[in-house]
């Protein structure tokens, strides 16, 4: 594997591990969202640590309207008050919120039976929560917009309260999403590192050869790659006592005078002697 793959791969593994741990931590926090941070208290001090989402209060009271005045009886029959000793944010849900100085006399509890709305009108269904097989009803919110400090809350007639810290859910889900994103990035780093390392290794089978050559570097010309002119030698026929080519065929009478340098004498034919007539000698 190429050195780039060996570097990118471990970085991806590290990011994947960190992302996995973050996601696991976020899932653990999400699983605890339904748990109450303050259980069955009648009064107490709620600690605000840089959370401006405040708290949500539940009581053991049914969501009914027995007098039919369109107001949930839980808001009419239970009285809760709270104050805060730290700074707070005015117009918290507006476009231009402002930070205000501490006001220990300011009431920071508001009645709200619905998670996304304020008030106790029966047009809103009261939010319910379960704790150890007990169905609880939301009655209100405490210190929404409060900054770091302590919140003192009291329920009259010793009514028990179950309180959740707002903002935990958003932080927990942010951790889950962040962890998953980091895990995906880590996995991508691992895949790209392995693929890149293998590709670069296959593309350069001879690691000793430096494939990088600057533009100004002089290189030896490759004469084998330059087409060379072809010179064709003209061969002229050279005759040295070579008889001319035979162009015709035929039988001719040999000339004995030219066959040899030795003189050849012709045989002389002598006339046969006259033997006479046979009948003359009879």
Image: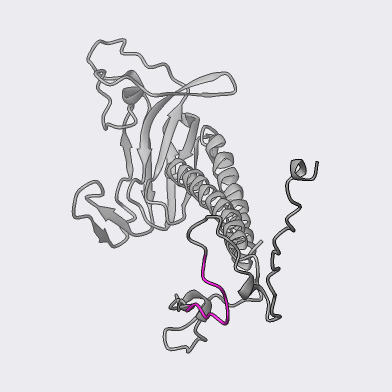
The answer to if 73 sits in the magenta stretch is no
Query: Could you tell me residue 41's position as x and y percent?
Result: 53, 36
Query: Could you tell me residue 147's position as x and y percent?
Result: 37, 56
Query: Could you tell me residue 240's position as x and y percent?
Result: 57, 82
Q: Is residue 196 above or below residue 179?
A: below
For the point 42% across and 50% down, which residue is it? Answer: 151
In terms of depth relative to the viewer, which is nearer, 109 or 32? Answer: 32
For the point 53% across and 48% down, which residue is it? Answer: 179
Q: Quadrant of residue 251?
A: bottom right
**Range drawn in magenta:** 235-245
Q: Residue furthest right?
A: 282
Q: Quadrant of the C terminus?
A: top right
Q: Quadrant of residue 111?
A: top left
Q: Is residue 123 above or below residue 185?
A: above
For the point 73% across and 58% down, which residue is it? Answer: 272
Q: Main secondary structure of the magenta part?
A: loop
- On the picture, is 76 further left or further right than 42? left
Q: Name the image colouring.
A: one colour
Query: Could you tell me residue 262's position as x and y percent?
Result: 71, 80
In terms of depth relative to the viewer, which is nearer, 19 or 133? Answer: 19
């Amino acid at each position: 594997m190429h050195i780039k793959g060996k570097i990118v791969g471990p970085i991806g593994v590290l990011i994947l591990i960190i992302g996995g741990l973050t996601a696991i931590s976020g899932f653990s926090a999400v699983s605890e969202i339904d748990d109450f941070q303050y259980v069955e208290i009648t009064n107490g001090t709620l600690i605000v640590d840089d959370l401006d989402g405040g708290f949500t209060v539940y009581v053991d009271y049914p969501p009914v309207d027995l007098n039919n005045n369109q107001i949930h009886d839980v808001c009419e029959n239970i009285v809760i008050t709270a104050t805060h000793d730290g700074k707070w944010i005015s117009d918290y849900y507006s476009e231009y919120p402002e930070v205000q100085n501490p006001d220990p006399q300011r009431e920071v509890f508001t009645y709200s039976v619905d998670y996304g709305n304020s008030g106790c009108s029966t047009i809103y269904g009261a939010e319910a929560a379960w704790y150890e097989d007990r169905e609880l009803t939301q009655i209100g919110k405490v210190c929404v917009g409060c900054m770091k400090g302590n919140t003192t809350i009291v329920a009259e007639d010793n009514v028990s309260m179950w309180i959740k810290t707002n903002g935990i859910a958003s932080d927990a889900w942010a951790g889950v999403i962040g962890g998953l994103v980091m895990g995906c990035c880590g996995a991508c780093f691992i895949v790209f590192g392995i693929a890149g390392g293998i590709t670069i290794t296959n593309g350069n089978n001879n690691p000793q050869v430096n494939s990088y050559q600057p533009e100004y570097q002089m290189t030896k010309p490759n004469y084998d790659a330059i087409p060379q002119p072809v010179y064709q030698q003209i061969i002229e026929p050279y005759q040295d006592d070579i008889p001319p080519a035979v162009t015709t065929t035929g039988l001719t009478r040999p000339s004995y005078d030219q066959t040899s340098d030795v003189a050849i004498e012709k045989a002389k034919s002598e006339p046969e002697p006259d033997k006479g007539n046979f009948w003359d000698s009879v």
